[in-house]
């Protein structure tokens, strides 16, 4: 089982988004059969079997083993991944294009960049898996609290300058055997996390212009 499965096909995406099938898919993070799943989901075994056949036909679950029970054979299945992400490639006709209107201060452009990142890395993962080769990537994830909008703007300017110098130092467009890599840096407000009692943090944006 993979940690993250990438869905690139629109038909597979449609199957995975069905509420009942999504629940069964989540339950099959651990191996199970139509009988055990029917009890968990409150559905008939026949209904569960129908959904399982659909999920299996679209590559979202796989057979683990078959167990003989009396005159019947019980099929034990599990999800092909612990979690899934739907690539924008599944909606190619309407996928966002970050080249259309680049704007460093646009949240929608940041989202378009993130969509392209999901599409490209998803395609690379699938290719690396097929070739049985490792995929070299690198990521940084952190949070920073700015005292003011001015500090945020100064940080963005300094980061841009630093990255430009770093890229200039290491980029070699004529290197024989070299490989191009994409670098994406994004900055956005952090979401307020829910508390244990279901309410949200009361932290407010106190930036001073």
Image (cartoon, rainbow, N blue to C red):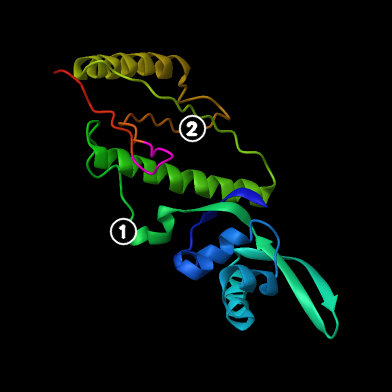
Residue at 38 percent of width and 41 percent of height: 114
The magenta-colored residue range is: 193-199
Q: Nearer the viewer, residue 159 or 167?
A: 159
Residue 67 percent coordinates (x, y): 82, 72
Residue 106 percent coordinates (x, y): 22, 36
Q: Main secondary structure of the magenta part?
A: loop
Cα separation, mark 2 vs mark 1, equals: 27 Å
Residue at 31 percent of width and 19 percent of height: 160
Residue beneath disc 2: 180
Observer-side mark, 2 or 1, equals 1
Classed neighbour count for the residue bearing mark 1: other residues with Cα under 10 Å, few (<14), some (14–19), many (≥20): few
Q: Nearer the viewer, residue 23 or 136?
A: 23
Left or right: 120 with respect to 57?
Answer: left
Left or right: 29 with respect to 106?
Answer: right
Q: Nearer the viewer, residue 38 or 180?
A: 38
Q: Secondary structure at mark 2?
A: loop
Residue beneath disc 1: 94
Q: Residue furthest left?
A: 209
Residue at 55 percent of width and 29 percent of height: 178
Q: Secondary structure at mark 1?
A: helix
Q: Is residue 169 above or below residue 111?
A: above
């Amino acid at each position: 089982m993979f940690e993250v499965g990438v869905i690139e096909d629109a038909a597979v995406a449609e199957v995975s988004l069905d509420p009942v099938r999504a629940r069964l898919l989540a339950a099959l993070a651990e191996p199970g059969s139509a009988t055990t799943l029917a009890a968990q989901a409150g559905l008939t075994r026949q209904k569960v079997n129908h959904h399982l056949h659909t999920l299996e036909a679209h590559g979202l679950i796989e057979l683990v083993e078959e167990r003989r029970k009396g005159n019947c054979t019980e099929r034990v299945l599990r999800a092909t991944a612990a979690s899934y992400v739907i690539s924008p490639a599944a909606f190619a006709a309407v996928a966002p294009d970050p080249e259309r209107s680049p704007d460093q201060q646009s949240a929608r452009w940041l989202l378009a960049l993130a969509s392209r990142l999901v599409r490209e890395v998803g395609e690379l993962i699938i290719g690396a898996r097929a070739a049985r080769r490792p995929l070299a990537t690198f990521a940084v994830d952190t949070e920073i609290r700015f005292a003011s909008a001015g500090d945020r703007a100064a940080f963005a300017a300094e980061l841009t300058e630093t990255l430009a110098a770093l890229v200039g130092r290491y980029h070699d467009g004529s290197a024989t055997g070299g490989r191009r890599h994409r670098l994406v840096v994004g900055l956005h407000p952090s979401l307020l996390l829910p508390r244990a009692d279901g309410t949200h943090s009361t932290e407010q944006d106190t930036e001073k212009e």
